[in-house]
Amino acid sequence: MDTFKELYFPSSDSRQLNKRLREEHENFLTENPDWTPNELRLLPKVIARTFNKMCPKTPFMVPFGWIDGTTWADLREQDRIMSLPEDQRYESAEAHKNAIRGRCFRIPRPYELKPGEAAFKAVQDYAIVDRRVFNDETFDHNVPENLLDAFNSCWERIAEPGEWWTGKERVAILEEVRKDREKDHSGVRSSLADLSDNPSHIISPLVCEIVRKVTSNAHEIDDKWAKEAIGRIGEGKYSELVSLVVNILPIDIFCLLLERPVVSLPVPKNGKPSELIPDGLDDGGAFVPWRTENWVGPNVARALSFVPKDNAMRMKLVESMYAGSDRFISMIWDDKEPLDRSQVEIIAARTSSINECFY
C-alpha cells in the first residue's frame, strides 16, 4: 500500500521533470509574454502579460496552466512522448502524469472516491485529460475511431502554418468563429470599406468581420460582397479563412449536440505561410479560382482547391461524418448503419435548406 508521502507528495523524478518543464515554459514566456492556455483565451492580454512577467520573480506564483498540465511546455512534452517508440510511451506518460499530480495537494470530495482509490485520483483523472485532443474522455457516447481520428487530424492541421495565414492567425480566426456563434446577430453588420486591415493584436477588424459573415451569415454572401472581401485580403487568405470556418463548425456542433463542451483550440505552431498557388487553377464561375484541369467530380469537392491541404482535411471530415468515397456513390448502405442513405440525404437536404445553402 502506498505511504502517505507517496500518495500526496511528488517523487524526486517528478520534481526533476517539473523543474525542467517549468524552465522550458518560462523561457517560452520571455518570447511570448501574451500566452495563455486556451481555457483563458478571453483573458485581456495586458493581464496575461503582467502575470507572465511577474510569475518567475514572485514566490509561490505558478504559470497559467501549471496545475492542470496545460502549459506550453506540458503540451510539448506530450508531443515528445507521442513521438517515442510505442513501448516507451506508457512509462513516459505516467511520469508526466505523476509530475502534474505533484504540483499541488489534491483531495476530492469523499463521494468522488472509489474503493481502493488514492484520495487525489478522482481530481487528477480530470486534471490530466488533454482538452485539446479528442479521445474516449471527450464524449459520453461511443464515437467511432475514424471520427476521432479525423477530428484530431483537423486539430493538428489547424495549429500548423497554412498556405496564407500563420498558425497564430489561424487559431485567432477560429477564436473569432466561436465568439461569433455565441452572439445575437440581429444588429447591422459593419461595412468592409469602413474597417481597418491593420492587425489588432493578431488579426485585423476587417478579417474579424469577414469571419463573422462566413460563420453566421454565409447565406447573405453575394458576388459584390465576396469581390470586396477578396479584394481587401486576397484570394488565398479568403479561401483559407473559409476553409477554417467550415472545418471547425461541424466539429463544434457535433460536440454541442452530444452535450459536451467544445474542445479547446490547439497551441499554434511556429512557421511562415508557404503562399504557394497550386497548379491547375482557373476561373470556373466561383468567387475564387478552383481546379479546372482534368477535373471530374462534384463542385463542392473542389470549392477550396486554392488551399489543397485544408481542402483535403475538409474532405477527410466529410468522409468520416457523412460518407466515405467507397460509399458516396452507393444508394444502398449496409444494414448495420444506424441511418440508411435516404435518411441521411433527407437530413442533409433539410439542413442545407434551413441554412439557405448557396450550393
Image (spheres, rainbow, N blue to C red):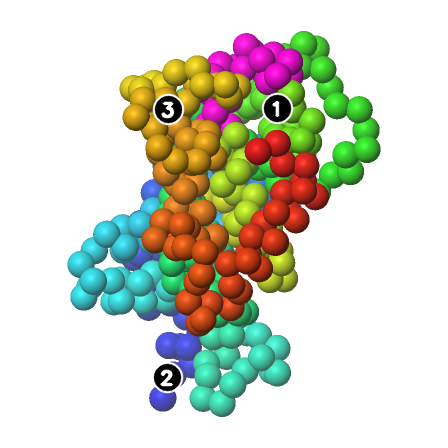
In primary-sequence order, the first of circles 3 and 1 is 1
- Give the percent coordinates (x, y) of residue 59: 50, 48
- Give the percent coordinates (x, y) of residue 314: 43, 41
Q: Which residue is mark 2?
A: 2
- Give the percent coordinates (x, y) of residue 293: 31, 22
Q: Count residues near mark 3 (Cα–Cα under 10 Å), then give few for <14, some for 14-19, many for 20+.
A: many
Q: In the rendered structure, which amino acid carries the disc numbered 1?
A: Ile
Mark 1: secondary structure = helix
For the magenta stretch, what is the residue range? 223-241
Which secondary structure type mostly characterizes the magenta part of the structure? helix
User: Which dot, 3 or 1, sits closer to the camera?
Assistant: 3
Considering every residue shown, the one lying at the far front of the view is: 331
Q: Which residue is mark 3?
A: 291
Nearest the viewer among 213 and 45 is: 213
Is 231 on the left or on the right of 117, as rendered?
right
Q: Which residue is mark 1?
A: 210
Q: What label does residue 171 carry, if any? A: none
Q: Is residue 261 visible?
A: no
Is 288 on the left or on the right of 258, as rendered?
left
